[in-house]
Amino acid sequence: MKQSGRYNPVAVSRRGVRIGIRWLAMVAALLGAVQSAQALPLFNRQTGQNCMACHAGGQFPELTPYGRLFKMTGYTLGQRTAVPLSAMAVVSDSKVANTSKSLSPSTDFFKQSDVILATASVFAGGKITDNIGAFVQVTYNPYAVQNSDGSYSGHSNADNMDLRWADRFVDAQRDLIVGVSLNNNPSVSDPWNTSPAWMQYVPVPSPGSSQFIDGTTPYPGYSSGGNIAGLTTYAFLDRTWYGELGFYGTARGPLSFMTAGIAPRTTLRGLNPYWRLAWNREWGANSLMIGSGGMYARVYQDPSDPTTIDRFLDWSVDAQYQYLLDPHAVTAQLVFATNRHGYPNAQGGQVPAFVDASGNALLPSNFKDRSHLLRAKLSYVYQARYGGSISLFSLGGTTNTANISSGFDPGTMTITADPNATAPSLPVNGNLTGNPGARGGTLEAFWMPVQNIRVGAQYTIYTRYNGASTNYDGFGRNASDNNSLFLYMWMSY
Amino acid sequence: MIRTRFLAPLTAFALVSAVTGCANLERSRDVSNPAVPGAVLAQQVCANCHGAGGSAASPNFPNLASQTGPYLVSQLKYFRSHDRSDPPGYEYMWGLTRSLTDSQIDGLAAYFSASPLGRQPVEGEAGQIAAGKRVFEQGVAANDVPACASCHGSGGLGNSIFPRLAGQHMDYLVKQLQVFQRTEQRSNPTTMPTGEIMKNVAHKLDERQIVEVAAYAQSIGN
């Protein structure tokens, strides 16, 4: 078995050269293919415009004021395309800083430093009529299922779906956009990129080597997940006030296509409210949004047992500032998100199998948990070609012994991963404290050689993970051991 | 299996949409339907960047309100034919104009030329504005630069094919003067002869004068 954690400069440099050559060859081949085909994604073909018209500095999917209006008017601006399809793929390479503190690095950090096809999507939709348009994404995950022999199989499933009707009433006194969205992911209908569905945006690969990259760090999100069906109605008045209200339920019957390929699908109790209010102002090259959104969701753990309901209340306050004046694009984003989680009665007050270092029982588990997340991001793009960003995150929350997945086994009074132990612990992903806390940040630099290819490098740093800075998993793993380098090439066609 | 599950509802959605969603000519954003009046496109499409009535909040986009009709017509046709190829032109305008009819272009020009330009914040500094005023009204005799006012009107209000400059965003004017000065993207002796005139003028201005004259033009009326 290959020893990990031993530094061999010759091997590292040769490997670096090989990876570098592989990336360069891939960039060259793709540039040639894309430029010769002169292909543009679906919405570009519909409007005939450059990506940067709708995406700030061309960095998809972050929207410009114009892009937001394009979305709010139901993707109906432009002209209907003959083939309303687009495709997207991400090729990536992830590297976790320390793989030595693991009992099985090859599985815990599967595909470490390997260039992989991370994910691929097909999009359909765009303008259908003067008032109706759609954004439908189906995504393929090459590492969706692990087979018994350890290999992985790919799988496709419904991703973001947003079918809209919209109208716009303009006269000398007012500008009113109204619309209805049938979608499968709370806030996927939102036009600002501080909303939970859109703030985390470089698609995340599945292999273990990618488990700590920026896309997997704490981002605002709705606890129901994006595997449900909802109908929302919204209005945008005088480009100033935005309001949206809707209800989400289980994607069943004729709406089951919205969760196709996902098993088990999320089952909600009844209809669950979602709301959004935002104030927007545009002056000069600046635009500012300050808003709030939230959702109350009742999610069955076991749809056949009505007593197993998790109750979630998520709400957030968010703000986004943009300065867009060619060739500069600056975006600042700030989100404060809170989550309340009420567990089924039978699950609260349970004493975990782990014990403390003295052999005493741990406290019973909570009936309710709270968490709060602060996330900020600042990005700059020059000439819609060269960009960079810095983001910071801080997640805090209640400590709950139910979250403990590493601890002292009462039989041996050790922290052990032995599956035969009374209370086996989990290296790498284990939580010794029962606290969800995480803190850190990400630095990113990217380059867009052509408007539909983005090549980027991210480095994510952790100062706290699973509620601790050091030994968070009970096996000596520190938060900083999870620091990760992520290289990606994101292409759309 | 997945394909069937996706296709059936989406096809139903498309069919229902096609049947129920007839063309909405009074509020359409369809830039390829010749039946949609220019004024409707102005409100539903152009206003997204150029502002309500053509008064653009962002200096990234020119004000179109109170612009001269003949100039608007000429530029829209240049975008449509790809004769005008400055970056904002092809990034934003080629696609939107590709299917416009002459009649729609006339309608757009009529709408914006009749629309009043609202007052906007002054974008230049006082010193720049004062210096720019001299260039604008008197030209630069030493470099054989004619007064801008000689073609664009004494108040910069434009004259037929010569565009209104009064109140136009300073950043836009600077960038366009640089396009005239450094490229052939807006000038051609045959297809864009007025651009050729501007190219000759812009060649004789230095960077500072470009900024100053743009600052003055933007300040007129604001």
Image (cartoon, rainbow, N blue to C red):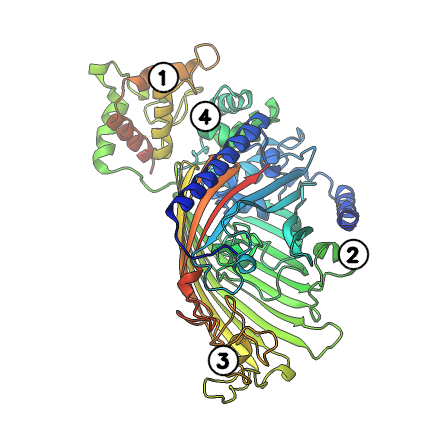
Above/below status of A356 relative to B195: below
Which amino acid type corresponds to the residue marked 4 in the rendered image?
A: Thr
**Chain of residue at mark 1:** B
Q: In this view of the protein, which residue sits in the foreground, A23 or A31? A: A23
Which amino acid type corresponds to the residue marked 1 in the rendered image?
A: Lys
Per the model, the C-alpha gap separating discs 1 and 2 is 62 Å
Q: Which mark is residue A254?
A: 2
Camera-nearest label, 1 or 2: 2
Camera-nearest label, 4 or 3: 3
Per the model, the C-alpha gap separating discs 3 and 1 is 82 Å
Per the model, the C-alpha gap separating discs 4 and 3 is 84 Å
Per the model, the C-alpha gap separating discs 2 and 4 is 54 Å
**Residue topped by disc 4:** B68
Q: Which mark is residue B199?
A: 1
Residue A391 lies in quadrant: bottom left
Q: Which mark is residue A414?
A: 3
Does label 1 or label 4 sit earlier along the sequence?
4
Local crowd size for mark 2, using a 10 Å CA cut-off: few (<14), some (14–19), many (≥20): few
Q: In this view of the protein, which residue sits in the foreground, A167 or B9? A: B9
Residue A297: x and y in percent read 62, 70
Which amino acid type corresponds to the residue marked 3 in the rendered image?
A: Thr
Q: In this view of the protein, which residue sits in the foreground, A182 or A124? A: A124
Camera-nearest label, 1 or 4: 1
Local crowd size for mark 1, using a 10 Å CA cut-off: few (<14), some (14–19), many (≥20): many
Camera-nearest label, 2 or 4: 2
Viewport quadrant of the C terminus of chain A: top right
Does label 2 or label 3 sit earlier along the sequence?
2
Is residue A61 among what the camera can see? Answer: no
